[in-house]
Amino acid sequence: MSSFNQNVIAEFRANAGKVGGPFEGAELLLLTTTGARSGKPHTVPLGFLRDGGTPLVVASAAGADRHPAWYHNLLARPLVQVETGTEVYEAVAVPAAGARRDELFAQVVRAEPGYGDYQGRTARVIPVVALQRTHEVPGGEGGIAGKLLSVHGWLRAQLVLVRGLAVDRVREGGAATLGLQLRQHCLAFCHTLEFHHRSEDAGLFPYLEQQHPHMGEFFRRVGAEHAVIARLQEELVRALDAPGDGPGEGFSDRVERMSRELESHLDREEAQLLPVLRALEG
């Protein structure tokens, strides 16, 4: 990260989103992506506009012929962190496509004509990215039990969204904008699910089995379920970037199977684990 960006980020966080110098009076946000290759967090200050309540950021790179690194990162890992003023929240980054992109870019240029100049400098189509706030699980109980319920609630909500987008894409004949929304939300869901199950397999489950050896058979069963779900997840991810029009009706069938498997798996986990976790924390 450049020292200039570091200074802007430090000033932003120290002053509730207010920055002086060349950005004085401008509306900025901090976008944290996950490095496509490094896997490390990468934070950049960006100007933004709003489409309704949704922030829009523009991958202009000042008219360079290559997309900025943060854009490549969010294509690989769509789940991002957004900081606006004193608010910090999680979002799924969804580039606009087709006519929707052109419409949004025209809005951007009307508000900030400099972006039109940037587009004039390059043959690449400058992306406009919507930062769609993810589902927030209402605060409930604390501790590990509360965390488990929160993650499960997030996964269920994202899966419902992905199912709806898959159905809409088939209904509307593979519309480009729906395709990108489906890809980004599905990747965010799959990456979070993968991380959650790996954390359970490597940390939570071995610890609980030490405390409750009689639950060994249950942990072996859910471990096997994790493997089945991981295979379904891999199929989904491969299908997302299929050649041609990408995922179609067959993809909806895959999503439905994932939904059935995951819902029953989450229900079983909660029925068995929540009493144990609550007792440990009681």
Image: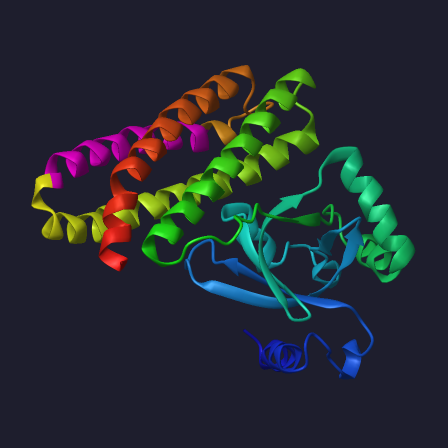
Q: Left of 128 or right of it: where is 220?
A: left
Residue 30 at x, y = what percent? 63, 66
Residue 117 at x, y = what percent? 85, 58
Residue at the outermost left position? 213
Residue bounds of the magenta highlight: 215-238
Q: Dividing the image into 4 quarters, which one contains the N terminus?
A: bottom right
Q: Please tell me which residue is depicted at 60% across the width and 23% down the height of the picture.
A: 245
- Examine the rendering and report whether any part of residue 241 can be seen: no
Residue 226 at x, y = what percent? 28, 35
Specify the principal SS of the magenta part: helix
Q: Dividing the image into 4 quarters, which one contains the C terminus?
A: bottom left
Image color mode: rainbow
**On screen, 128 above or below 189?**
below
Q: Left of 201 or right of it: where is 257?
A: right
**On screen, 30 above or below 134?**
below
| Residue 216 inside the magenta-drawn segment | yes
Residue at the outermost right position? 110
Residue 128 at x, y = what percent? 73, 49
**On screen, 122 above or below 21?**
above
Q: Left of 8 or right of it: where is 217?
A: left
Q: Please tell me which residue is depicted at 24% across the width and 52% down the height of the picture.
A: 279
Q: Please tell me which residue is depicted at 43% across the width and 39% down the height of the picture.
A: 190
| Residue 221 inside the magenta-drawn segment | yes
